[in-house]
Amino acid sequence: MIDTAAVRTYLLGLQEHIVSTLQAEDGKTFLRDGWQRPAGGKLEGDGLSQLVEEGGLLERGGCNFSHVKGASLPPSATQHRSELAGAPFEALGVSLVMHPRNPYVPTVHMNVRLLAAFPEGKPAVTWFGGGMDLTPYYGFEDDARHFHRVNADALAPFGADKYPRFKAWCDEYFFLKHRNEPRGVGGVFFDDFNEGSFEEGFAMMRAVGDAFIPAYLPIVQRRRETPYGETQRDFQAYRRGRYVEFNLVWDRGTHFGLHGGGRTESILMSMPPIVKWRYDWKPEAGSEEARLYSDFLRPRDWLNE
């Protein structure tokens, strides 16, 4: 049985837990921006965007909840499932991106979601999706191993195949094809997941959502007081440009939201506040910046190396 009300209750609780935890760590209160789309439009539903800017830890960070319904799935959602074109749908999820000020603290992204389609005269179809990935500017093996270990442990109850499968999926998905480089050190990612029952998919989604704070907070606490200077901030701004490129060029969630009539302010909350681009720039050989490319921006077996 499809129980979107239970999914909604869980997601709202997850958002509050994440925001309250990071708010305590940051020291600045997150802005709360609730919104609603009335019935009768292209989309109807509601959501809550929570955002902090110029905080003690986070230069910019946001955590969104949204729950929308539409009369017809947008093309970005049906490109691989044409039989559902024109079907009414319901989509709800929590998505976050945190951009810390200190370049030694990595940017992080997490998303958990449910998409349900209701084709006329046929049973409803549901897909769960989600995952999280880490984008360091200065790499630390201990951080990457910890992040991957927490994700592997969270997925272990759902089958030995899930972590390696979703880890590989993450490496493939968060890849800038036009740059031929990964966005970061990965994590886990799954999309259009409808294996097993609704209850099993929901349980796996919850496990991933619940793993976010244990995966990320210890890294924040370990690195947030690391001294840095203008060189590190400059490199951080340069690498944030890759984040912008991925989100605007390749990310399916961004495309789904923008092309489906979603709320632009909430969708683009993932953008970093300060970004730089340079023409054909390369880091100095042997530098910390060069080590990010040679040691971290490549697929690695973080649990066994």
Image (tube, rainbow, N blue to C red):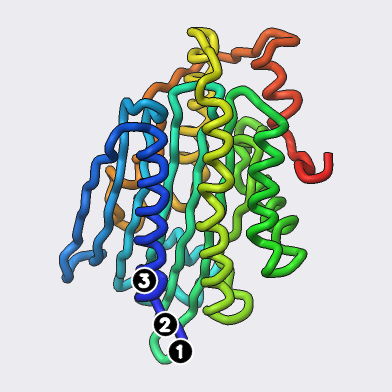
Residue drawn at x 37%, y 39% is: 24
Of 17 and 296, the residue lying toward us: 17
Of 92 and 247, the residue lying toward us: 92
The furthest residue to the bottom: 121
The circle drawn on residue 122 is 1
Q: Is residue 198 left or right of residue 147?
A: left
Q: Label 2: few (<14), some or many (≥20) within 10 Å?
A: some
Q: Find numbered disc 1 in the image and state the secondary structure of the residue it sits on.
A: loop
Q: CA distance from mark 3 to mark 2?
A: 12 Å
Q: Find numbered disc 2 in the image and state the secondary structure of the residue it sits on.
A: loop
Q: Earlier in the sequence, mark 1 or mark 3?
A: 3
Of 265 and 151, the residue lying toward us: 151
Amino acid type of the residue that numbered disc 1 sits on in the rendered structure: Lys
Q: Which residue is mark 2?
A: 119
- Which numbered mark, 3 or 2, is in the foreground of this view? 3
Task: Decide: is 186 above or below 275.
Answer: below
Q: CA distance from mark 2 to mark 1?
A: 6 Å
Q: Which residue is mark 3?
A: 90
Residue 35 lies in quadrant? bottom left
Task: Decide: is 80 above or below 28.
Answer: below
The x and y percentages for residue 117 are 42, 76
Q: Are marks 2 and 1 in contact (CB under 8 Å)?
A: yes
The x and y percentages for residue 70 are 30, 69
Amino acid type of the residue that numbered disc 2 sits on in the rendered structure: Pro
Q: CA distance from mark 1 to mark 3?
A: 16 Å
Task: Decide: is 253 above or below 274.
Answer: below
Residue 91 lies in quadrant? bottom left
Residue drawn at x 75%, y 24% is: 294
